[in-house]
Amino acid sequence: MTLSSFSLPPRRDSLDLAAIRVSRGDFAGQRLLALETSGDYLSVAVAHGDQLFSYHQPAPQEHSGAILTVIHALLEQAELAPHALSCLAIGQGPGAFTALRIGVACTQALAWAWNKPYYAVSSLAILAAEMAAEISGISVASASAAQEPVYFIPVFDARMGELYAAVYQEASSGTNALQCVVAPSLMSPADFPSWFCQYIHPGAVLYFSGSGVAKLDSQLSELQTHFPTMHILASALQPSARQLVQLAVMAQGSWQHDPAKLEPLYVRNKVAQTVAERAAKGNPEYLGRPDLRQSQS
């Protein structure tokens, strides 16, 4: 079988079609397939005409077995053939390594097979856009009137006692787009305040959300003395393919045409650590275990 003849598998009977959501929007005439697999959720969306067909469900360690089936079901429901797609979009991380590779590899293979451009963006940027949509611009507008800068800080739990975080701000162009102020970074919760304060000056209006916020209770209390206008949005917010579709529409000039260049955005370059390295970083599992530390020396 050649790439040009690649086809999607038939829909799996166990797929919960009731989980597919249909909504309406303005997609500038583009027909898009978007994938976001940076965490425990499998998020897929297809935009066709003024309709958006989306699937956003928990699928821990099940991305590989479900992703093509979900894509097939959404394209079928949207009555959209793969050759009619305008672009594929992917949330490229950071996040869970295996889940990221599945989403990126799937996008890469389909872009090659269907000869389509792709759009890749950080999953943290997708969550920042979710945050901006969550507040509906009301708080941002009032803050802007007071000439106070407004920042969105998505934070992911990176496991291994660390966090992924970035900082975004409304673009000065007056559009709904966000611009990245601080690129996706990796740090410990203890280092978060110093990392943040080297970029953002006191007095700004801050919005936090993401799976990593729960690990920052004391650190956010410390920051609040310098940033009294701080808001914690629902930790249940997740980067979604629905939001990714909107970002892809706004970024048509950034669509890429060489799938070979598509790579996950890992941020963390090393996953496997020795027991001693984990203990040195304060991993609770290894604290108070000098025997394990010595065994690694």
Image (tube, rainbow, N blue to C red):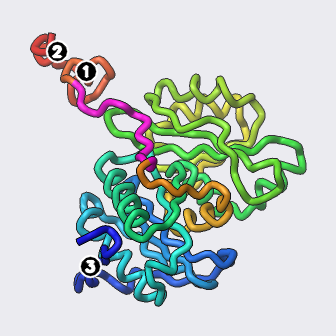
Determine whether 135 is above or below 5 in the image: above
**Is 28 colored magenta in this rendering?**
no
Q: Position of residue 242 (x, y in %)?
A: 54, 69
Image quarter hosting the C terminus: top left
Q: Which mark is on residue 293?
A: 2
* Prevailing SS of the magenta stretch: loop
Tell me the residue that label 1 is attached to.
279
Of residues 234 and 240, which is closer to you in this image? 240
Identify the amino acid type marked 3. Answer: Pro
Q: Quadrant of residue 64?
A: bottom left
Is residue 238 visible from the viewing direction of this image?
no
Q: Residue at x 38, y 86 (%)?
A: 18
- Dot 1: within a 10 Å radius of its alpha carbon, few (fewer than 14), some, or many (20 or more) residues? some
Q: Which residue is mark 3?
A: 9
Q: Cβ–Cβ below 8 Å for labels 3 and 1? A: no
CA–CA distance in space, label 2 to label 3 = 49 Å
Is mark 1 in CB contact (under 8 Å) with mark 2?
Answer: yes
Residue depicted at 42% across the width and 74% down the height: 55
Instruction: Locate residue 250 relative to residue 70 in the image: left or right.
Output: right
Q: Earlier in the sequence, mark 1 or mark 2?
A: 1
Start and end of the magenta stretch? 261-273
Task: Tell me how far mark 1 sits from mark 2, CA to CA.
Answer: 7 Å
